């Protein structure tokens, strides 16, 4: 890897008599470095007012960017920006979703920018201390622990890729992020009625669909028309695959809910509510905002939870409270494992507890 041409320049104070000559060696104003790579220009502080010392910093940076082994730098480095570009190109080839690609692009670039702020421009400069310092900023950047866990996963995927390519000798260890589980918050009958009263048209129909099918907001708002299936008896069921897990679900919905969904849907279109223009994640995100607005108008507050997820909680808890087995509820929710269902909803499985109580009592005889 060849090093780019690095230039030392001066940023003068307003009172410097050499202001206007950024290449003078005669003043004690702060020295900076700049260079270009792959059509992008970079700058960094040299951290000194001495031109001679800036030359040393320039030489060390050139070694870093060229991957040269020196006495000062015993390990070969690989340029962070070049690694980042190669990683993203690999994700493009895999044809991941636009939403996933955008997350990788945003979060890894944010991490690289942090590294560059610490004067780290190559992969070998990444160590556990650097990662710990970066994670210390997360509570401010990412209030949600679930988001912090996702960001750590994205960075680890990038570092593992660089290690597999032979550019990084080892992947620094990162302590696991403990996710605060939000409380299960099914809506009361009064709360649900207030939310419906506050919602109108398509938004109300999507709310009804989510409440009675257990679908997440993206699954419901982008549902195919063919996935609202009418049986021979005239009853409608939602038959689809969960976007998040890919698990197949089939859930019957009440006749009045089906009628409301069909009345609000686009007639003769491929999808009930989305016309296919733009990105599905953007459309569903907007629908989520509309649902949140209805909750706010109805004065229904939510603690530590996505507002639209409370409709899914209402669906699950209603079934469990009325004796539907946990195993069946797990299938209807599209969970990949019943463990997930139990973690969130075990307290609502009254029928299961009643059966356990009966078995224990039966041993007394």
Image: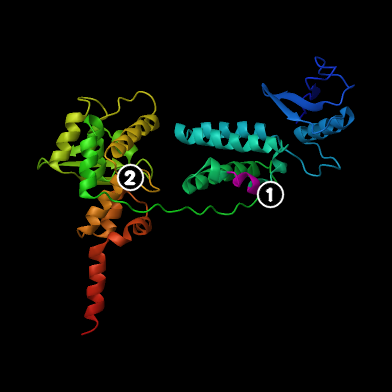
Q: Residue at horizontal 24%, vertical 46%?
A: 191
Which label number is shown at residue 78? none
* Residue 7 seen anywhere in this rendered image of the structure: yes
**How far is disc 2 from disc 1 in space, using C-alphas?**
40 Å
Viewer-proximal residue, 304 or 296?
A: 296
Asked whether 352 falls inside the magenta stretch, the response is: no
Which label number is shown at residue 301? 2
* Residue 97 seen anywhere in this rendered image of the structure: no
How far across and down, in percent of the image, does residue 252 sit? 19, 45
Looking at the image, residue 20 lies above or below residue 239? above
Q: Residue at horizontal 20%, vertical 29%?
A: 264
Residue at the far left in the pictured view: 233
The secondary structure type at the circle numbered 1 is helix
The answer to whether 311 appears left or right of 168 in the picture is: left
Residue interval drawn in magenta: 132-137
The answer to whether 44 appears left or right of 245 in the picture is: right
Q: Quadrant of the N terminus?
A: top right
Which label number is shown at residue 129? 1
Magenta span: helix, strand or loop, mainly? Answer: helix
How far across and down, in percent of the image, does residue 234 sit? 10, 40
Q: Earlier in the sequence, mark 2 or mark 1?
A: 1
The total number of labels drawn is: 2
* Residue 320 in which image quadrant: bottom left
Q: Residue at horizontal 25%, vertical 44%?
A: 211
How far across and down, in percent of the image, does residue 307 sit? 34, 43
Q: Quadrant of the C terminus?
A: bottom left
* Residue 298 in which image quadrant: top left
How far across and down, in percent of the image, does residue 310 sit? 31, 46
């Amino acid at each position: 890897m060849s090093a780019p041409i690095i230039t030392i320049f001066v940023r003068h104070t307003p009172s410097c008599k050499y202001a206007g000559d950024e290449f003078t060696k005669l003043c004690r104003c702060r020295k900076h470095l700049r260079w270009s790579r792959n059509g992008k220009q970079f700058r960094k502080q040299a951290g000194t007012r001495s031109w001679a010392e800036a030359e040393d910093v320039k030489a060390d940076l050139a070694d870093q960017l060229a991957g040269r082994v020196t006495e000062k730098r015993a390990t070969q480095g690989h340029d962070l920006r070049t690694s980042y570009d190669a990683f993203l190109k690999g994700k493009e080839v895999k044809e991941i979703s636009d939403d996933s690609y955008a997350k990788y692009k945003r979060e890894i670039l944010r991490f690289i920018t942090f590294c560059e702020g610490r004067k780290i421009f190559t992969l070998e400069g990444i160590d556990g201390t650097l990662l710990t310092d970066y994670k210390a900023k997360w509570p401010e950047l990412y209030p949600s622990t679930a988001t912090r866990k996702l960001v750590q996963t994205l960075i680890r995927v990038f570092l593992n890729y660089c290690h597999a390519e032979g550019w990084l000798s080892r992947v620094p260890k990162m302590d696991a992020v403990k996710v605060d589980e939000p409380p299960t918050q099914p809506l009361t009958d009064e709360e649900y009625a207030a939310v419906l009263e506050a919602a109108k048209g398509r938004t109300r129909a999507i709310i009804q669909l989510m409440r009675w099918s257990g679908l997440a907001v993206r699954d419901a708002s982008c549902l195919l028309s063919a996935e609202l299936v009418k049986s021979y008896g005239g009853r409608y069921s939602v038959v689809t695959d969960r976007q998040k897990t890919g698990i197949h679900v089939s859930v019957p919905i009440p006749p009045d809910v089906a009628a409301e969904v069909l009345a609000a849907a686009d007639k003769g279109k491929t999808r009930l509510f989305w016309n296919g223009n733009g990105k599905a994640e953007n459309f569903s995100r907007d629908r989520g905002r509309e649902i949140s607005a209805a909750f706010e108008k109805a004065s229904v507050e939510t603690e530590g939870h996505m507002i639209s997820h409370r409709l899914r909680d209402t669906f699950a808890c209603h079934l469990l409270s009325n004796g539907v087995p946990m195993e069946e509820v797990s299938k209807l929710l599209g969970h990949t494992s019943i463990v997930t269902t139990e973690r969130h909803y075990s307290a609502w499985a009254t029928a299961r507890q009643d059966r356990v109580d009966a078995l224990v009592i039966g041993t007394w005889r």
